[in-house]
Amino acid sequence: MSEFFSEISLAYIPLLFLLGTATFTLSTISGGGGAMMQIPILNFLIGTTQTAPVINLGALISRPSRIIIFWKHIVWKVFWYFVPAAVAAAILAGYLFSRVQIVWVQIIVGLFLISTVFQYKFGKESRSFPVKLWYFTPLGFFVGIVGTFTGGMGPILNPFFLNAGITKEELVGTKAAQSLFLGMAQVGSYSFFGLLNRELWIYGIALGLGATLGNLFGKILLARMSKLSFRRWVIVIMVISGLVLIVKAIPEI
């Protein structure tokens, strides 16, 4: 048993559990971004090259609880447009993980997310550009690629959901269903290509169990929120996520 934990910093386990709880509580009431909020902390604790596998493993573990909680709100027609392309992209990205840099893509996505505060006029506007269902197929491929590299791309979906008229429980539930299959492809790719060792599995499980608890707390808070409040929280998290992506990318330029 002592050999099993010899490579693991035990102090990280409760810290990652609490991090998962806090970020996924906030993620639930803001339509996503929990993984993105974890990036700076995990970069500091375990290093940038190990952050994405741990985040995506933790997120995958938390998905079933969020799907169960929001099952009746899932918009399945969006799910079927998104998932096949996202899964294919995640498998491809797992193979390319240690071979390709996507720094400039991260910066562009970050700037787009920051711009949403102006697109929605600080939450006063409910939509900023028209969205058709087929948009979710190329979007799924893009998110599958970039999310596998960075560890979190949920917020990039939010403008498209909001502009499709999908909000609150429908947004959270549909994204959770999509993310389950995307997460399975991501974690499967990490494992197959040797990017998840025993230490990272333990960290990811601790993060995921905390995130599961956060889903329950977030559900309670979300039920009490108005659509306007929800939209404002979504915008705040998108802006923060955009800043995180840019700050993360700058040292790699």
Image (spheres, rainbow, N blue to C red):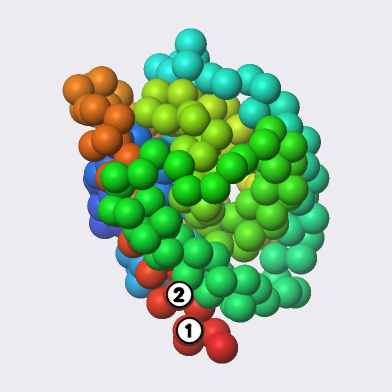
- The x, y position of residue 153, in whole percent, is 53, 53
Q: Is residue 195 above or below residue 231?
A: below
Q: Quadrant of residue 37?
A: bottom left
Circle 2: element type: helix
Hey, what amino acid is under mark 2?
A: Ile
Which corner quadrant holds the N terminus? top left
Tell me if residue 10 can be seen.
no
- Residue under numbered circle 1: 250
Q: Residue at x 36, y 44 (%)?
A: 125
**Would residue 190 be found to the left or right of residue 213 on screen?**
right
Left or right of 143, for residue 207 = left
Locate residue 225: give its quadrant. Answer: top left
- Give the Cα separation between the discs numbered 1 and 2: 6 Å
Please name whichever residue, 222 or 61, is drawn nearer the observer in this view of the structure: 222
Front residue of this view, candidates 28 and 49: 28
Please tell me which residue lies in front, 210 or 87. Answer: 87
Q: Amino acid at mark 1?
A: Ile
**Residue drawn at (64%, 46%) of the image:** 187
Q: Is residue 143 left or right of residue 250?
A: right
Task: Indicate whether 251 appears above or below 159.
Answer: below
Q: Is residue 224 visible?
A: yes
Specify few, some or many for label 2: CA neighbours under 10 Å numbering under 14, 14-19, or 20 or more.
some
Does residue 253 sit above or below 225 in this rendering?
below
Give the residue pinned by disc 2: 246
* Label 1: which secondary element: helix
Name the spot of residue 248 as percent of width and height, x first: 45, 75
Q: Position of residue 62 (x, y in %)?
A: 45, 33
